[in-house]
Amino acid sequence: MIVRFFYASKISKRNVFQSITRKHDALPHLRKYSSTTKLPNKVQFVLSKMEREKNVTREIQPILGTPTTEINQIFWSKDEGNLKLEWVDPPRSVLIVKKPSSEPTSKAFTELVKWFHDAHPDLNIIVESDVAEEFRNEFPFVHVAPPENKYEYTRVVDFVITLGGDGTILHVSSLFEEAVPPAISDLIKGGISLLLRMRLTCALWTAEKKRVVKDGQEIGDLQAMNEVNLHRGRYPHLAAISCYVNEQFLTEAVADGLIVATPTGSTAYSLSAGMYPFRGPIIHPSVQGFLLTPICPRSLSFRPVLIPQTAKIQLKISKVCRSPTEITVDGREICMLNKGDFLEVQASSYPMPCVNRVEEGVDWVKDINNLLKWNQNFVNKQLLIHGLS
């Protein structure tokens, strides 16, 4: 689970953690290891569907009859709204991820780790290696996952706390190759209600249908929470990209690039890309589908396309493309693709479970109005007061 802390001194961290560990007593012994390899596996949990009627949220039957340790496509395909999570035993390990080079997040990190260590010494605190090095004298008891084992976080982490903004959450998504711990996008008050946000799986292939190699190593499947972006990068020429949906030729795009975006990513790069007034649409995060959005296409008829989550998209660098094309995933530079190389994008089997406040339900409507100012008239108030000069 990802707990996103917007640091505020007036917020009681004790109440937050007690809401997570409710109905469970503390574990009897303190565990201290320098490496996560000796930590126990994460705790099993039960997921149940939740319904909201007349401003009252109620729990209905569990989705599966037995507890599990991962949220995958089985739950995602059954999800029609929010889910309730309840651990079988108290959570054992928390991963704390902070925004780098930020004094406010460093201060929040220091207070949070001290509080967890003092109030809940049974909880294993896991951090990234650079954070452990930064605070090595202050917090020698934290744990670090071995860099050679990319599945270690998936094995041990029960929930995640992010200290930062949206970019920090995207970074957390990149840390989990498979199942992501349930993700909380704000402070918890009360019960835990989940919304499964779709992720994308991206595979890179050469013209010879071999995995793309970078620095002597094959690039494995990549997970994207917002978008996969294939673009011309630093080159002045337009990219030429052949688009296929389920191996059926769709079109050859001549543009600055193409974006494959999730519903979550529909309010990110995809929203501002394309041509006015046909920029990418805003999609509810519960919609099981993804967007194919052009970036400044040459053709005026190229509009964003909504594709079902069961489809597989193939984007191939055309033979007429005049320069290499760069691929980025959630803002991370991956590599360059040459003529004949291609990438395959499809819905990931491992969505990002985001936790909402039960009493508020899904926060999407509030967010697009309060954060994006959706459909609001952007009028300069000073002009209304003083008039045009």
Image (cartoon, grey):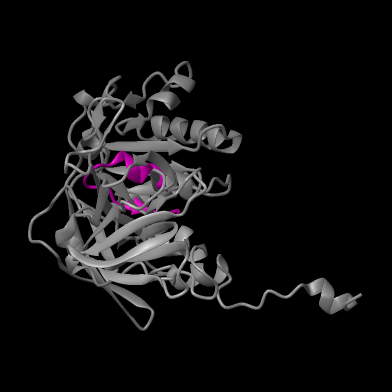
Q: Tell me which corner region of the image, top left, top right, bottom left or bottom right, holds residue 136.
A: top left
Q: Residue 348 or 297: which is nearer the viewer?
A: 297
176 in the magenta segment: yes
Front residue (pair 134, 110): 134
At x 52%, y 69%, the residue is 275
Q: Which residues are magenta?
A: 170-187
Q: Position of residue 161 (x, y in %)?
A: 40, 43
List x then y, in percent, for residue 236.
52, 48
Please tell me whether residue 144 is drawn above or below residue 202 in the rendered image. above
Is any atom of residue 64 visible in this view?
Answer: yes
Give coordinates of residue 124: x percent, y percent. 30, 31
Q: Nearer the viewer, residue 258 or 103?
A: 258
- Quadrant, the C terminus: bottom right
Q: Left or right? Give the position of 236 relative to 322.
A: right
Q: Is residue 190 visible?
A: no
Decide whether residue 122 is among the magenta residues: no
- The residue drawn where x is 17% and y is 35% is 41
Residue at horizontal 43%, vertical 67%? 363
Q: Residue furthest top?
A: 137
Total marks shown come to 0
Q: Which of the 4 image quadrants contains residue 277?
A: bottom right
Question: 339 above or below 77?
Answer: above
Question: Residue at position x 23%, y 54% from top?
Answer: 348
Q: Position of residue 229 (x, y in %)?
A: 39, 52
- Picture layout, residue 109 above or below residue 16: above
Is 275 positioned to the left or the right of 332 in the image? right
